Amino acid sequence: MSRARGCLALPVSLAIAAASALADPPRPPMARQQPFVVRSPHGDRVDEYHWLRDDDPDAKRAEIIEYLEAENAYARAMLAPGQALHDRLVAEFRARIQEDDRTVPVYDHGWWTWQRFDRGAEHPVLMRRRGGPDGPDAAAADEVVLDQPARAAGHAYYEVGATDISPDGRWLAWTEDTVGRRRHVLHVRDLASGKVLPLAIDGVLEPVVWAADSRTLFYIRQDPVTLQSGPVYRHVLGSDPAGDVKVFEEKDRTQFVHIGHSASRRFVLVEIGGFDTTETRAIPADRPALRPRMVFARRPGVRHSADHLDGRWFLRTNERALNFRLVAAPEDAPDDRSRWRTLVPGRRDAALDDFRLLHGAVAVQERVEADTRVRLVAVDGRRGLARPDLGAPAVATTLGEHRDPAVRHLRIVTTSLVEPDSTWDIDLASGERLLRKRRVVPGYDATRYRTERAWVRARDGARIPVTLAWRGDRARCGGRAPLLIEGYGAYGWSYDPHFAGTRVSLLDRGFVVAIAHVRGGAELGQRWYESGRLMRKKNSFTDFIDVTRHLARARWADPARVFASGGSAGGLLMGAVANMAGDLYRGMALHVPFVDVVTTMLDETIPLTANEWTQWGDPRNARAYRYLLSYSPYDNIAAKPYPPMLVTTGLWDSQVQYFEPAKYVARMRARRTDSNPLLFVTQMDAGHGGRPGRFEVLDEVAREQVFFLGLAGITD
């Protein structure tokens, strides 16, 4: 692996300003202990902080709120010496945002739609204009589809889940969450009059789909306990929602349910699936009263995604292709494998990530050696298609948004840790590339920054990809730079490099930033995923540790100033690594972390538990129980020193309940033997993703950077 080329050794004060400012710090809250026995077929465990759990969806007990607020007050006091730096960072972040901005318009069946951001607004306004596949009608007027800033007014939290415009263009259906618990309300707006109908269906998931008659809506009612899935219902405008018809209900609670349009708009798709199997059913869009018919039946171990266009089905499947292949299937017998035609064969050295259907061609997104690329595949013998080639190592090239297969172009997006997003349209006839937009980042000069891909040998010989970024004239090389390593490693989701204007502030202060693409993700295909899940999950943790040690040995970093950060399943990664090798890090951030693994996976009433038995393991099985217990961060907190930690959560989080990190911090305070800072912040009006506004999130990012910069001895 090469060294950080182009770096200079610049003087940076190593005096830890926070040390003197916090010479007499406030005392942290100490949660009371109240033993509770967690029962299991394979052994009971005592949880002394179980009392912090409250499942009430609308309010929490006063003693819990009091404790969380005490932790928030303690964190504010500990971070107070860095308030000036915090404010400066927020100002820097905001200065890199083009406040009056708009997204590139997308063609959608007779309309071009886009999002408009007004100066000072947290949320965008959804806009549209009439037009054809070649472009918007210059004589047509811009129309407001959904004014999110107006809808958000008066709400501490506001987020739109999904939107869908009826085929006749008159009605907008959308779902919105005003709590942060992923519990949405379905609304409908008459785009002709601008009025919102009195219809308001509470307790639904994000997706909503119109039938061809522009009167019938399909939606998913949440399971009132697990929240993550539920039955599909059909609603007809003007009718009482109490009489809505249940269209489909999946009895297996380990499976998720999703609904959507086919590319042809001929079908409403009902997709059922988990981490090991998938099923697709379809409702004719012009006959919405029919029951969903089976298109592709589930088979054990077989996963797929299906779509329909031009009288045939297209299927991305891992059947006889670990890294997936793309096949075309006849409309009259889609599940007849003897009539399948392979368009993209499965390969060992490349993974098929995604696809989009266009008339006469299929755009596919592939992954080779941790990098994504996009190419066009001919259908029906068509020749001369454009072959996009805008990628490079450590640059993510992905499929852009396509809503109508009649478009004349293929849209792709490129980005990296140091290059702002660029949106390209590739003309399907000529192959000409048109740069539609490069994200404007005021004051940012990309030529000052560097990125590259490195490879690290894991302890078992596996090659771990690592993406690095630094500022060429600021990073202190030769083993003197502070280093932040991020990771995730779960669900087969790849942690691809992307540009974030907030990251620039760290790079400008001499940090090197790295993403460790550990096993459990799919950066190197499905084998990379399979080798980091279930009974191989510990590979994710040891990969991260091995990357950390290697980068320090290779002089990418000052070994005394290495930091780590991860969220959700990445928070599990951080918690396990802290137990296994916490001495490698000067500080760690655990955001909405999944840390109480065994207790959560034993409890089917907790959202996601049953769905994720095939991801982590089912602790009702003795072998899985012992393995989960061996790495669960909460269960393995020991009486030993730990690095300084910043732990965050959202009170209304439905993916990782707030009480997991709350209990983790309480037990960590009682057991650790050091006096390092341990800060716990609960957002009292947000959920798993934090506050969704484009400026609201800046405060959260600044908090983490102040924490790390202070520990690194960098006051500015």
Image (cartoon, rainbow, N blue to C red):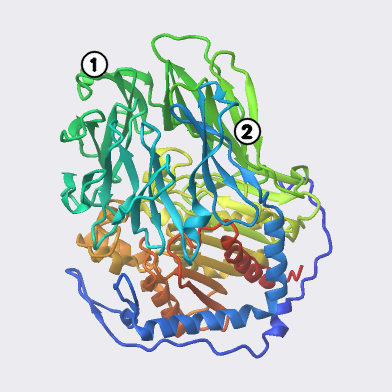
Q: Quadrant of residue 551?
A: bottom right
Residue 392 bears which disc, if any? 2
Secondary structure type for disc 1 = helix
Residue 34 bears which disc, if any? none
In this orientation, which residue lies closer to the viewer: 156 or 555? 156
In this orientation, which residue lies closer to the viewer: 180 or 116? 116
**Amino acid residing under circle 2:** Ala
Q: List x then y, in percent, for residue 38.
A: 24, 76
Q: Quadrant of residue 76?
A: bottom right
Q: Quadrant of residue 633?
A: bottom left
Say whether residue 388 is visible.
no
Instruction: Give the mark nearer the N terminus: 2 vs 1.
Output: 1
Instruction: Measure the alpha-carbon separation of dots 2 and 1.
Output: 37 Å
Q: List x then y, in percent, for residue 132.
A: 50, 22
Q: Residues within 10 Å of mark 1 (few under 14, many from 20)?
A: few
Point out the image quarter for the N terminus: top right
Tell me: 49 left or right of 525. Answer: left
Q: List x then y, in percent, for residue 592.
A: 45, 65
Residue at left 59%, top 67%?
A: 585
